[in-house]
């Protein structure tokens, strides 16, 4: 029975992905939900029909690896038999409740009788029960319940939240003699408890639903294929209780902190629009100290050539002092800086607020390494290691103040940090008129700013407080030395090189109470929908793996057996 419920859960997750379609926020999700995922199945199924998924090798491989008589196979091969409303709503979420937490998958039913008949036929060992007009099947901490037009799959998630709230703290306790004190058994939701929750959710009032939250309603109303909601304040709230964070005001960092994101599969790209909400105090601070757009010169100063990775950002240095005060750690930070003969005000005086980081000429190079053997003679071997030209830069507001900050940093690194003078001197850097530049290549540092270069990627990320660019194809191309002579790995690498192109991220603006950002993952095929392309890509990889598995099987079957050798018994 437990296996049947597992298959049912897996199959329904797959079905919900390509069957839910509503953008309405009115779902049986309580306001204390910490994580929610909503999937616009109608949009996804239009971009990638179920019939196309079934034709791919990865799908066939997945079906082949489950019991042929299982409920999962029936549902995956013919979703119309499920009784689910393929034009209904679909949700996956996590919610706290008392000492524990539970996870839920919720979707609409088109025909409850059809769903029950499918269970009885595909999993006859499963007993369908009823309570308060709610039908259900259960096993341990897993429950499937349905009533009228709503179906739910609930599971206990208490262990996850308890581990999260412990945050690596020692949970075992010992007495004065060192004997382990038996702790109270961890809380878990039983199937009976989950059934009560399911019945409660079936009749949840609108005011008690997460859909009544304006921010959540705005997210679900945003056009897209997948929506994500993460309430960090509720998820991590218990972690702060009794911790050092609660003694300061660092809890403000997660209080009211909500991340909302919309994913869209477009032609040639996967795009993510996100908003990050904060509490009232942080919101007031962000409004007062808004970041400007990053300085494009920081990237135009990069020497000519291929740039694999680049990030540029702007932050308001004068807002740092207000942030430390808000968190209640300004005194602690000032005391630490005073010991080093420095202050927050001097940091603000030294820094302009523009930073950048860049990586160029990335590759995995072959190297010969050696170590001393037992006989004292060197033993050499071939290996590989990553290589590239790194650059970091910080804009200088006042040169004398920045020089003092550098001297303070040197003392701290060679003092409390324990770094040797020799190691520190091996790090090349240069303090120019407007920029502090450091990295791992002296020529790159020297040539920074010698000539302006309009790198093509700059236009894709400029005009924002934060811009990030990743040339994915160049990383794949630069890693060829790591692949060796393995034909399968090379085939997948060639396929990936043609599939992936670049990642672009912009953001940092604070609008309508939220920090906004945009991410675009660009693919090699600009004319095909990215979801369809991704399905084909995974299918080709699965086929390569399947063909290699078949090749190895045939090779093993045709290998001539080794004749047995009789070893005479020793004579005594």
Image (cartoon, helix red, strand yellow):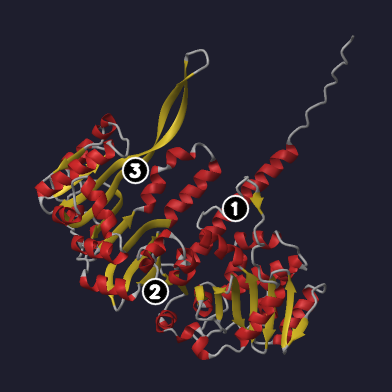
First reached walking from the N terminus: tag 1 or tag 3: 1
137 displayed left or right of 421: right
Mark 2 secondary-structure assignment: loop
Marks 2 and 1 close (CB-CB < 8 Å): no
Q: Residue sitting at 9 percent across and 47 percent down?
A: 400
Residue 390 place in picture, x, y as percent = 28, 43
Mark 3 secondary-structure assignment: strand
Marks 1 and 3 close (CB-CB < 8 Å): no
> In the figure, 154 relative to 478: above or below?
below
Residue 377 place in picture, x, y as percent = 47, 14
Q: CA distance from mark 2 to mark 1?
A: 33 Å
User: Nearer the viewer's eye, disc 1 or disc 3?
Assistant: 1
Residue 269 place in picture, x, y as percent = 40, 66
First reached walking from the N terminus: tag 3 or tag 2: 2
Determine the image quadrant of residue 159.
bottom right
> In the figure, 128 relative to 340: above or below?
below
Q: Read off the residue under disc 2.
A: 256
* Crowding at mark 3 (Cα within 10 Å: few <14, some 14-19, many 20+): many
Q: Read off the residue under disc 1.
A: 173
377 displayed left or right of 98: left
Q: Read off the residue under disc 3.
A: 362
Q: CA distance from mark 1 to mark 3?
A: 49 Å
- 441 or 566, nearer to the observer: 441
- 538 or 314, nearer to the observer: 314
Residue 530 place in picture, x, y as percent = 45, 66
Q: Residue sitting at 18 percent across and 41 percent down?
A: 407
- 514 or 245, nearer to the observer: 245
Determine the image quadrant of residue 363.
top left
Residue 171 in sight here: yes
Q: Residue sitting at 43 percent across and 80 percent down?
A: 216
Mark number displayed over residue 300: none
* Crowding at mark 2 (Cα within 10 Å: few <14, some 14-19, many 20+): many
């Amino acid at each position: 029975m437990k296996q049947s419920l597992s298959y049912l859960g897996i199959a329904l997750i797959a079905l919900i992905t390509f069957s839910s379609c509503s953008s309405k926020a009115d779902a049986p999700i309580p306001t204390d939900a910490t994580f929610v995922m909503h999937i616009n199945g109608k949009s996804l199924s239009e971009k990638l029909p179920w019939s196309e998924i079934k034709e791919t090798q990865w799908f066939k491989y997945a079906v082949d690896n489950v019991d042929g008589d299982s409920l999962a196979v029936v549902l995956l091969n013919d979703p119309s038999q499920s009784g689910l409303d393929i034009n209904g709503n679909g949700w996956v979420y996590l919610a706290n409740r008392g000492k524990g937490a539970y996870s839920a998958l919720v979707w609409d039913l088109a025909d409850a009788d059809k769903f029950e008949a499918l269970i009885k036929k595909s999993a006859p060992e499963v007993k369908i029960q009823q309570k308060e007009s709610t039908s259900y099947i259960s096993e341990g901490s897993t429950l499937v319940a349905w009533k009228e037009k709503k179906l739910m799959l609930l599971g206990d998630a208490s262990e996850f939240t308890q581990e999260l709230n412990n945050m690596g703290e020692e949970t075992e306790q010992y007495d004065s003699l060192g004997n382990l004190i038996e702790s109270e058994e961890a809380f878990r939701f039983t199937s009976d408890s989950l059934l009560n929750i399911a019945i409660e959710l079936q009749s949840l009032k609108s005011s008690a639903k997460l859909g009544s939250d304006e921010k959540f309603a705005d997210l679900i109303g945003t056009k897209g294929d997948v929506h994500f909601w993460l309430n960090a304040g509720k998820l991590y709230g218990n972690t702060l209780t009794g911790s050092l964070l609660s003694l300061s005001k660092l809890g403000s960092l997660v209080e009211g902190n909500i991340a909302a994101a919309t994913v869209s599969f477009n032609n040639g790209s996967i795009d993510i629009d996100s908003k990050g909400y904060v509490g009232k105090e942080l919101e007031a601070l962000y409004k007062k100290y808004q970041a400007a757009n990053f300085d494009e010169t920081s990237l135009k100063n990069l020497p000519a050539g291929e740039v694999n990775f680049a990030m540029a950002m702007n932050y308001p240095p004068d807002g740092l002092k207000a942030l430390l005060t808000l968190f209640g750690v300004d005194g602690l930070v000032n005391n630490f800086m005073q010991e080093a003969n420095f202050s927050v005000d001097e940091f603000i005086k030294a820094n302009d607020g523009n930073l950048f980081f860049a990586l160029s000429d990335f590759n995995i190079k072959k190297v010969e390494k050696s170590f001393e053997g037992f006989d004292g003679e060197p033993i050499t071997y071939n290996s590989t290691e990553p290589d590239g030209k790194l650059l970091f830069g910080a804009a200088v507001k006042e040169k004398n103040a920045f020089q003092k900050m550098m001297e303070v940093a040197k003392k701290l690194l060679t003092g409390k940090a324990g770094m040797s003078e020799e190691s520190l001197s091996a790090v090349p850097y240069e303090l120019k008129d407007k920029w502090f530049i450091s990295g791992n290549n002296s020529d790159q540092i020297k040539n920074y700013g010698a000539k302006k270069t309009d790198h093509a990627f700059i236009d894709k990320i400029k005009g924002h407080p934060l811009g990030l660019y990743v040339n994915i194809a160049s990383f794949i191309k630069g890693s060829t030395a790591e692949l060796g002579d393995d034909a399968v790995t090379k085939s997948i690498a060639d396929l990936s090189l043609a599939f992936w192109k670049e990642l672009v991220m912009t953001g940092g603006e604070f609008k309508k109470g939220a920090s906004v950002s945009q991410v675009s993952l660009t693919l090699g095929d600009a004319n095909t929908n990215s979801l369809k392309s991704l399905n084909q890509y995974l299918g080709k990889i699965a086929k390569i793996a399947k063909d290699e598995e078949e090749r190895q099987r045939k090779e093993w079957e045709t290998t001539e057996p080794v004749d047995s050798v009789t070893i005479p018994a020793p004579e005594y």
